[in-house]
Image (tube, rainbow, N blue to C red):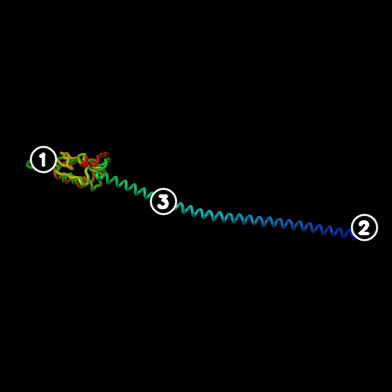
């Protein structure tokens, strides 16, 4: 058996130590490399987490601003809708006022009331008790107003709030214009309601006064504007 010389043993020890050192250095380098990689990964995750938190904070702020803007828009839309409703109501009120005072031509459904002198006058009776008088015409007009008539005319002549009606012998004067019987009073409004009201409160009273009365519903009635002194 060959003897290992001291020089060879020393060289082997050197090689062994060198190999150990190299292996340790390699492992140490790998560990440091992994640690650096892990630290980088943590930093990357921490950066992403921070970005996500910042995005979430920004989204909350934007959501708050959006909610505020939406509320502002809703408030402005509500104000605009109220203004439009007020304007629409004003226009409708003005239209109704013009219809009442007779400043514009109007048309619509309504009723036609015909007042006629009695066709039969008993002997020894005063004929004046059997003809149409201004109070009969006024009672019909007043009831139509109460029942919601939007416009009224007598023998085609539009009347206003201050129309003057008076008997002049066998004729009736409406704002200075004289009309003989029969007297046709037309009114625009809810035709069933107007007819019901007239039949309930006026017809019997006028008939008892010896006047012939006929009430009819009309689908379409046209009325010209109120005639002023200027024409």
Q: Residue furthest front?
A: 230
Give the numbered dot on residue 22: none
Other residues around mark 3 within 10 Å, as few (<14) / some (14–19) / many (≥20): few
Q: Is residue 130 left or right of residue 54?
A: left
Name the residue nearer the viewer: 134 or 103: 103
Residue 158: percent from left, percent from top = 22, 42
Note whether residue 145 is visible. yes
Residue 122: percent from left, percent from top = 9, 41
Residue 212: percent from left, percent from top = 16, 41
Note whether residue 215 is visible. no
Comparing labels 2 and 3, the label whose residue is closer to the camera: 3
Comparing labels 1 and 2, the label whose residue is closer to the camera: 2
Q: Is residue 143 left or right of residue 169?
A: right
First reached walking from the N terminus: tag 1 or tag 2:
2
Mark 2 = which residue? 2
Gap in angstroms between the C-alphas marked 2 and 3: 108 Å
Give the numbered dot on residue 121: 1
Mark 3 = which residue? 76
Gap in angstroms between the C-alphas marked 1 and 2: 173 Å
Please state, as top left, top right, bottom left or bottom right, where the N terminus lies in the image: bottom right
């Amino acid at each position: 058996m060959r003897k290992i010389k001291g020089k060879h043993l020393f060289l082997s020890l050197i090689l062994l130590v060198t190999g150990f050192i190299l292996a340790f250095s390699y492992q140490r380098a790998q560990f440091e490399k992994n640690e650096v990689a892990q630290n980088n990964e943590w930093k990357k995750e921490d950066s992403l987490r921070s970005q996500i938190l910042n995005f979430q904070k920004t989204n909350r702020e934007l959501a708050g601003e959006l909610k505020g803007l939406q509320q502002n828009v809703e408030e402005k839309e509500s104000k605009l809708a109220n203004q439009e409703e007020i304007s629409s109501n004003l226009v409708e009120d003005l239209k109704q006022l013009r219809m009442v005072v007779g400043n514009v031509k109007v048309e619509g459904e309504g009723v036609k009331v015909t007042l006629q002198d009695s066709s039969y006058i008993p002997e020894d009776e005063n004929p004046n008790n059997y003809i149409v008088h201004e109070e009969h015409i006024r009672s019909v007009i007043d009831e139509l107003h109460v029942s919601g008539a939007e416009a009224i005319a007598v023998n085609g002549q539009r009347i206003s709030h201050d129309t003057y009606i008076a008997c002049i012998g066998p004729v009736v004067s409406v704002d200075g214009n004289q009309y003989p019987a029969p007297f046709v009073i037309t009114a625009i409004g809810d035709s069933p309601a107007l007819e019901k009201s007239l039949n309930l409160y006026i017809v019997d009273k006028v008939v008892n006064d010896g006047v012939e009365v006929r009430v009819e519903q009309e689908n379409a009635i046209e009325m010209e504007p109120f005639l002023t002194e200027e024409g």
